[in-house]
Each structure stands twice: as structure tokens, then as C-alpha cells.
Image (spheres, rainbow, N blue to C red):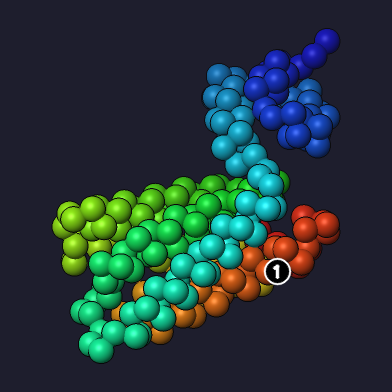
Amino acid sequence: MRPAGAALLRLYPATWRARYADEMLAVLEDRDIGWRDRVDLVRGALDAHWLAPRSIATAVGAALLAGAAWTTAAIVTLGEPVLPDWPGYLEVTLPLGLVAVSAGLVATFAEASRDVEHSGRSWGWAIRLALVGQSLWAVALAVAALGGPYGAITAVAATTGAVALVTLGLVALRARGTWTAAGLVVIGGVLLVPSIGAWLVAGATWTAIGLMAWSRRTGSDRSPVSLA
């Protein structure tokens, strides 16, 4: 006889079931589960699908793209005779900022999903915060690039996205203390500083994260440069 709730394990991704189904079945056999437990199982399945492991190529490509976009935006801006007022974007660098933030968002989640087995409640909330914060930042840049409101609203969105990135990095550092997690803290931290030089630091750090991910493309997910 299969324990109560075992059928709900079919909702989980095949990769998750291959690694954890036996362990979860043993847990279910040792307890009588109620409707709240069933709700938790369904919610866990949704999270497992949402954070399903993505290709390392996605993490590498997105991180390198984010690094190139931030670096290019900084170089273009520094070449101007007069630097723009903060948040510092020019008409030509708004699209670059949008690419940098969007690619950074993709790289963040591609990296985070590689160690989903280490996720906990704080980890899940940090990921969601990073998703919302960086998405708001990307939307604000897109609106400005299309001729919409720019200025204070863009700065607030950028601050929200940077704080969310720092939060995720700190949670990841607490979990495993890796170089990639530290990189997220650095990127989010410098992007809180109203300086074009911060874009150069963010670009260099994203590039380093991409190169580290590439260097372990055939290694274990438990490499010391993995995110979580």
C-alpha cells in the first residue's frame, strides 16, 4: 500500500522524483497527513517546476551578456563631455541598461535553480524578491526607453532591484558561502551607488560569474563556485 499523499508526488518534475521520491515516500509512511500537508505538497511541486534546473549555457550566456551590457553602457557614458544626472542613463544607454538588467535576472535564476535542493523558506522568498525587484527595474527601463516617465521612478526601481539582488546574495552566502553568491552581493551593492563607475564594477563581476560558470560546465553542481 502506498502512503497517503503519494499520488501527489507525480506532480513533481521527473528529475526531482528520481532524486527525492524514495525519501519523501519514507516521510509520508511515518505520518498521517492532512489537507494542509497536501496543500504543501502541491505548493512544493509548483516551486520545483518553477525552479527546475536550467542549462548551464543559459547561466553563462546571460551573465556574460549582462557584463558586456553594463560595461558598454559605462564606457559610452564616460565618453560624454558631461555626465548625465542620476540615474545616469542616456537615450542610447537605456536599451543597454534594459539588456543588462534582463540578462542579469536570467543569469540569477539560471544559477539559483542549479542548487534547488538547498532551498528553504528564506531561500524561496529571496528568489521571489529578486524576481519582483529586478522585473520592476527592467519594466522601468523599458518604459523610459519608449519615451515614458524617467528620473525618480527609474531610480526607485533600480534601488529596489539592487536591494533584492543583495538580499538573494546574502541568503546564498549564508547557505553555502560561495564566490558566485558573493558576486551577487557585490553587483547589487555597487548598483546602489550613484556612479557610472559602479556600472563598470557590475559589468566586471557579471563577466567573472559567467566565466566561473563556464569553467565548471563539466563539473559538479556542488562546485565551490556554484550559487547556493
Mark 1 — residue? 212
Crowdedness near tag 1: few (<14), some (14–19) or many (≥20) residues, C-alpha within 10 Å: some
Where residue 95 appears, x then y in whole percent? 35, 61
Question: In the rendered view, does 132 fall on the left or right side of 18?
Answer: left
Quarter holding residue 102: bottom left
Q: Count the marks: how many?
A: 1
Asked whether 160 or 81 is in front, the reply is 81
Quarter of the image for the N terminus: give it.
top right
> Residue at coordinates 50% horizontally, 60% vertically from top-left?
104
> Residue at coordinates 31% horizontally, 64% vertically from top-left?
94
The answer to whether 194 is drawn above or below residue 158 in the figure is below
Question: In the rendered view, does 127 fall on the left or right side of 1?
Answer: left
Q: Is residue 228 visible?
A: yes
The answer to whether 8 is drawn above or below residue 127 in the figure is above
Quarter holding residue 226: bottom right
Where residue 80 appears, x then y in whole percent? 29, 84
Asked whether 90 or 224 is in front, the reply is 90
Question: In the rendered view, does 111 fall on the left or right side of 75?
Answer: right
Where residue 89 appears, x then y in whole percent? 28, 71
Where residue 47 appears, x then y in whole percent? 57, 36
Q: Is residue 198 visible?
A: no
> Residue at coordinates 81% horizontally, 37% vertically from top-left?
19
Residue lying furthest bottom in this view? 81
Asked which secondary structure carries label 1, the reply is helix
> Residue at coordinates 39% horizontally, 73% vertically from top-left?
73
Amino acid at circle 1: Met
